[in-house]
Amino acid sequence: MTSHIKDIRLAAAGEKRLKWAGLDMPVLNIIKAEFSRTKPFKGKRISACMHVTAETANLMLTLKAGGADITLVASNPLSTQDDIAATLVKNHGIKVMAVRGEDNKTYYEHLNQALKEKPQITMDDGADLISLLHNKYAADAKNILGSMEETTTGVIRLRALDAHGKLKLPVIAVNDAKTKNLFDNRYGTGQSTLDGIIRATDALIAGKNVVVAGYGWCGKGFAMRARGMGAKVIVTEVDEIKALEAAMDGFQVMTMDEASKIGDIFCTITGDMHVIVFNHFKNMKSGSVICNSGHFDVEIDIPALKKLATKVNYQVRNQVDEYIIGKKRIYLLAEGRLVNLAAAEGHPASVMDMSFATQALAAESVVSSKKRLDIKVHNVSEEIEKRVAGLKLK
Ligand code: ADE
């Protein structure tokens, strides 16, 4: 398979960013040095469907140091950092099929290629690769020793498959490790989502009514950081316990029907679909900014927004589309895709260090197991979690 990337000439710039991120990933670097000696993935093919970022590149180099033959494809059409893709191909001999802004057809062509490589290990961020495997390459599932899943939405999809007796291979829910979600989901999403909103709009956060839809770890992190910058934070949450938690954390809690009338900046982080819909757009004040930091671009009902709008001015600023609704203007960021990865660079390296150290050790546990793991969704072992947390603390 040949790589498909935007421009190989971006490699020099990408290499600088890859190295810069690596400086803030000490735990992963320790594991990389260990893998260089022990070669746990010697002779193994790994296909990874992940955000192609500087941090992911450091994970790929760690797996490669362990002897793996790697194919990397994007887990979102808008999150690819083309310079990083270029350096992985040019300077590190890793096959990459990912072009920022690729259309849906290309996105799936790349995923198909990743599976045609006949991997023995897969890694997913959102479960698109494993879903495709189940739908189209089910006969190959038996050859896969295990698959790692990086994000909440992906784990939900895989647990649903498992519950219906349809899961065909062992999966490790990396997302559910404490060394992942307590830090990456909370501090990573909290910071990178604000980063994306600010880079896209240059908005002042202080004094704004910021509406956060969803109070899982990601929503919690974003609410906390928005408050830290002086926003008046409103939380909408359908789960009573989480809503109560938000109230006791000192946030205003209300329905989106109410919040839509007073919000200045809206961010969906629920993992659910159609969280902001037709009536909410109708309620909104002129100048409202809407974005999403959940995995899929379905949380904001964009077709309804398009229907309501009399005109759309695309890219009035990088990553900002202006929807005209009568005398009102509403701004949608990053086409409703993950604002932190599309309008900023994703979570900082320091927190991805923990997520990807957990990924790397989970992958090692798959190959070091004496027999193939049972076909179910496994948790990351406590031993791995303790090791990652202990190293990070140091
Ligand atoms: N998910 C969120 N931030 C990320 C990053 N920087 N790299 C890879 N995946 C991410």
Image: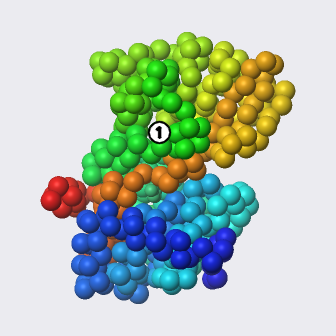
Mark 1 surroundings within 10 Å by alpha-carbon count, few (fewer than 14), some (14 through 19), many (20 or more): many
Residue 265 in percent (x, y) is at 55, 27
As helix, strand or loop, the secondary structure at mark 1 comes to helix
Residue 327 in percent (x, y) is at 79, 18
Q: Residue at x 55, y 80 (%)?
A: 89
Left or right of 200? Residue 67 is left
Vertical placement of residue 96 versus 136, above or below: below
Q: Is residue 271 visible?
A: no
Q: Nearer the viewer, residue 291 or 314?
A: 314
Q: Residue at x 40, y 40 (%)?
A: 190
Residue occupied by mark 1: 194
Q: Amino acid at mark 1?
A: Leu
Residue 23 in percent (x, y) is at 32, 67
Q: Residue at x 50, y 54 (%)?
A: 345
Q: Nearer the viewer, residue 393 or 175?
A: 393
Q: Quadrant of the C terminus?
A: bottom left
Asked which quadrant contains residue 379, the reply is: bottom left
The quadrant of the picture showing ligand 1 is bottom left
Vertical placement of residue 309 versus 8, above or below: above
Residue 343 in percent (x, y) is at 57, 48
Q: Residue at x 34, y 43 (%)?
A: 187
Left or right of 264? Residue 167 is left
Asked which quadrant contains residue 111, the reply is: bottom right
Asked which quadrant contains residue 385, the reply is: bottom left
Count of residue discs: 1
